[in-house]
Amino acid sequence: MSILVVGSVAFDSIETPHGKVQKCLGGAATHFALAASYFTDVRVIAVVGEDFGPEQEAVFTKRGIDTRGIEHANGLSFHWTGEYSGNLNEARTLGTDLNVFADFEPKIPEAYLDSEYLFLANIDPKLQAKVRAQMPHAKLVCGDTMNYWIADHRESLLEVLKELDVLLINDGEVRMLSGEHNTVRGAEKVLAMGPKSLVVKHGEYGATAFFGARAFPHAETTAKPFRAPALPLAEVVDPTGAGDSFAGGFYGYLASQPAVTPAAYRRALFYGGVMGSFAVERFGTERLQNVRLAEIEDRFKLFKEISHLEEHQGLGVA
Amino acid sequence: MSILVVGSVAFDSIETPHGKVQKCLGGAATHFALAASYFTDVRVIAVVGEDFGPEQEAVFTKRGIDTRGIEHANGLSFHWTGEYSGNLNEARTLGTDLNVFADFEPKIPEAYLDSEYLFLANIDPKLQAKVRAQMPHAKLVCGDTMNYWIADHRESLLEVLKELDVLLINDGEVRMLSGEHNTVRGAEKVLAMGPKSLVVKHGEYGATAFFGARAFPHAETTAKPFRAPALPLAEVVDPTGAGDSFAGGFYGYLASQPAVTPAAYRRALFYGGVMGSFAVERFGTERLQNVRLAEIEDRFKLFKEISHLEEHQGLGVA
């Protein structure tokens, strides 16, 4: 089923210990859409400037991504400049030129209104709410956010949270949003704010999903938390977009399934990890533009291999 | 098969957000021995003072632990005072009274010399080396350490590492010992220092095992890394000894198996997580003194349930 994603399509200038790139294609919606495109149809709502030309457009269309919702405005596209050092876990932002993104007013093309899966990438929660309101028939709504919105736009964010089926969030954001040090208690508090389930990302340690009572309407009991691993990587070339690629793999796989069951959700977490692990192998979107389905399946098997036990007899007690 | 553990048997005075205890039984060898005792025979080498009486002795003997190697010296036992606040991830040490432990010279009783599994808990690497040298026929040698020995006793520690089959270590210690930010590259460097395999502990995120080429002599290829989860816990009463209990569950299960195979090693990591998760439920050793085997099996199943996928068809590519 089709996913509608709203978020940033941007240019990134990035320096990591592995090199430097100037104005390569980036943005949350870009990484998300590319990762999700291996599993299902994807439609993008974003705004770009005059520096976004046929070359950038082709990155989307070659993957079959619908770009009719990408608005072309006068001026330059959103441009982020950042660098990573040391363990590559945290980016240092050197520049954020919002450009045409500063006045972004998402417009949903008529042809997108039947999208059943909605993904609200990390943008102003006020815009997330506007898009959500225009898609009343979306079957599943998933949203991302960041520390900035939690700290400085809390009221708007709380409004959006009420509308979400799934919230993607990281450990630090759970603590910030809930005021709880303990992740489990923090997750419970965030679930009480509205989302039916949470995916808490732990960076290089994977992710944990927490489920509220309404996460799976047909399930008899509340689903237990689920922990998905990340691949231990000896080399991360560029972590930019890893979280959005995780989101794309997760939500893309979920949308490709006949129903959102606990089993499908758990597998989706693994596919999220798989797509995130590809994303960081090259700068920008380079790797995500060219992954073979067989590579995805091989890596999925690898994720299982590094985290699953063989069958055995147990300790022999009742 | 029997495990011989050498390490501290101590008294701990602990304050956490859940309460306060004065001089409860603790020490690395204590937590390790109790956790391992559910899987196999355990023999302890340690030194205690006059404050260690029949009540403390009974904690060991009730679990069938052999205490003939616990030396009784004049003076007081090792006494650690510490507190935890906030997320309970890190202890603040308020006092370390080594007392009789300051002059600890491990002596191995004749009856212990046939122990096939040796565990060198976190003590001075010089003492670890002395014990190791007296147990030339040990089938498997596993060691623990800490930042203090890495920073200030590096040469002695490097000598011990050459003698180890398995090293237990945490993320920060891998970085410190290897000088590498990246855990995978760090693990490779530490493996090159001698241990045939490493268990890297990630606190609330579980643990990853890394294997060298000689980890499993009968295996045709080097085993892939393996990630074991930790249980998401809403309440940690007292984290003291969690790492030692993990070690006891891990090594105890391994020693109970007919052979050290990759499959047994992976399960052992899960049993390590299981015993660590029990340990933190109460202050000191209270919980580890009374766990039923059926509880261990139930929790092992829970660990599988929160980390394992159901069988499925994949994406349908070759």
Image (tube, coloured by chain):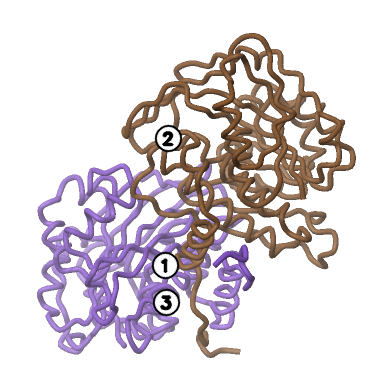
Chain colours: A purple, B brown
Q: Secondary structure at mark 2?
A: loop
Residue B182 coordinates in the image, percent (x, y): 59, 47
From the image, state whether disc 2 or disc 1 is nearer to you.
2
Q: Which mark is residue A245?
A: 1
Q: Which mark is residue B283?
A: 2
From the image, state whether disc 2 or disc 3 is nearer to you.
2
Residue A266 coordinates in the image, percent (x, y): 42, 72
Residue B161 coordinates in the image, percent (x, y): 77, 37
Residue under the point 33% across and 86% down:
A259
Pointer 3: residues within 10 angstroms few (<14), some, or many (20+)?
some
Above or below B115: residue A65: below
Pointer 1: residues within 10 angstroms few (<14), some, or many (20+)?
many
Q: Hey, which quadrant is residue B151 in on the image? A: top right
Residue to which mark 3 is pinned:
A59
- The residues tagged by marks 2 and 3 sit, at their Cα atoms, a distance apart of 57 Å
Q: Secondary structure at mark 1?
A: helix
Amino acid carrying mark 2 in the image: Phe
Amino acid carrying mark 3 in the image: Val
